[in-house]
Image (cartoon, rainbow, N blue to C red):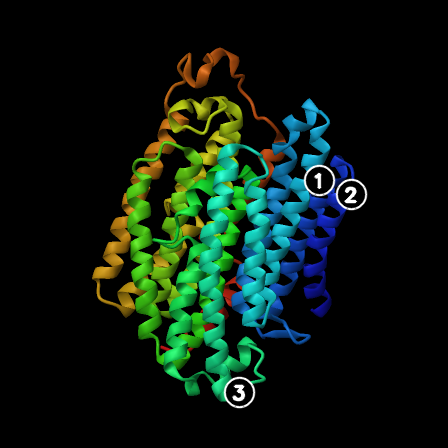
Amino acid sequence: MFVVVLLLLIVPFAGALVSLRAPAAVTEAATAAAGIVSFGLVLALVPAAAHRDLSYLPYLRVDAVSAVFLLATSFLYAAVALYSIGYLAPSRRRGGAGYPRYSRRFHAGLNLFAWTMLAAPLMSNLALLWIAVEVTTVISALLVAIEDTDGAAEAAWKYILTASAGLGLALLATIFAYYAGSRVLGEHYDLSFGPLLQVATRLPHTPVRLAFALAVVGFGTKMGLVPMHTWLPDAHSEAPTPVSALLSGSLLAVSFYAILRYYQVAAAALGPRFPRDVLLVFGVASLLLAALYLLEQRDVKRMLAYSSVEHMGILAIGVSFGAPIALAGVLLHVLAHAAAKGNAFMGAGVLVHKFGSKRISAITGGLDLLPWSGPLFGIAILALCAMPPFGIFRSEFEIVQGGFENSLNVTPAVLIILVTLAFFGLSAAANRMLLMPRRAGTAGSGAAVLARGEPSAWMVVPVVAGVAALLVLGVHPPAELTGLLTRAADELGAVT
């Protein structure tokens, strides 16, 4: 397994190096190959991680929790790498002196972005985890601004300022974690996660409490928790569609992964009540605000961004419930949300390409004009709304069931009400874009000039794969995956 872990760090980075120097056609192939190979490598890790922890060198560690997040990132990496071939096709056909340079920058950035998000869950050291998350900020900000428009530059600048402030607090959390660990393990303690968890019951409570609270605020800024979410709608709206998919389905999850590591230590050192209460407050606030904003969105990509805030709130609430089935539901939700949100952004990218606008009011008749992408986008919205038989229905059902088991009935009921409110906002917008008949003159052009058909098969195939993944997760997850989720939930719920 050591070779597999090592290759997982090498392959995306190698794809970035190739993309910097090779012709445009080669960069596309190299990126697609790197994404598919990375997903295959993670699949090879799953059976081993479902049964034991894997530790290599001083700073590499794979357990069941990290394997779940590796699986979400690698699947989305492979999907957007294929999707990007079709996404960039119009620019490639137009040619021009600027396209080869743009292609190299885009694919190199995409590979490096995926590399950092795959590296973060592999780090056994809290300091290296912080560094990996910090590097994701730098690379993703450059990708947000890659279109070189005023809106993209403003969104990237806002993202850098907000995320840097949050990660400054996360660094302070890391310092407090080191201080707590050094009181027991000595001053030469290197912030390795395993030893810290082993002596958690002996850690001083005040620095652990401060470390967890600062980690939730700091990494929660990157996760999109309210009120630190303000960068997210702008960045998701202005970034290229493949980048938006990775931002929403993977980057937010990686930031949540960092919070979970601090949660494990805090729950073991302090007992579960304090960390769960903190997550519950941020989770309910995020879900409430996102549900309200979804009712009045006019931009399709901003709508999906607020949907991400909603689902991050659901994850935080699910952990606060603490029941084993709720924790298993949270981890399943990470996987299902990655597939569903990736599908939704990729489908939105096709709609924007077809209609030439991100405004929901300008997109009508999508189901008729896009025989594949229209229905697939509708399926993605239904999946995000937790409709059966897709994976998010199963994960949210498990979270709610765990909430009724381990808490008063009020909190799970609030969760159900707010998720239903978000459903109305998403479904109303999707119905307008897909089912409302196309009228002449919308989006600045007549209906006759929009030919029926898909822009590219490369923009359809990955979405079909995402639907298949959502069905598998919702109907009958493979035994190895079920074992992985069960073991990961046990690791998170070791203290009850």
Name which residue type carries label 1. Answer: Arg
* Residue at 49% in and 82% down: 181
Q: Secondary structure at mark 3?
A: helix
Residue 21: which disc?
2
Q: Are marks 1 and 2 in contact (CB under 8 Å)?
A: yes
Q: Which sits in the foreground, 140 or 453? A: 140
Q: Position of residue 32 (x, y in %)?
A: 68, 44
Q: Position of residue 277 (x, y in %)?
A: 30, 68
Q: Which residue is mark 3?
A: 185
Badge 3 density bin: few <14, some 14–19, many ≥20, Cα 10 Å: some
Q: CA distance from mark 3 to mark 1?
A: 47 Å
**Res. 325 image quadrant:** bottom left
Q: Secondary structure at mark 2?
A: helix
Q: Is residue 465 visible?
A: yes
Q: Are marks 3 and 1 in contact (CB under 8 Å)?
A: no
Identify the mark nearer the N-term, 3 or 1: 1
Q: CA distance from mark 3 to mark 2?
A: 47 Å
Name which residue type carries label 2. Answer: Arg
Q: Is residue 251 above or below residue 54?
A: above
Describe residue 457's horizontal placement relative to residue 162 as left or right. right
Name which residue type carries label 3. Answer: Leu
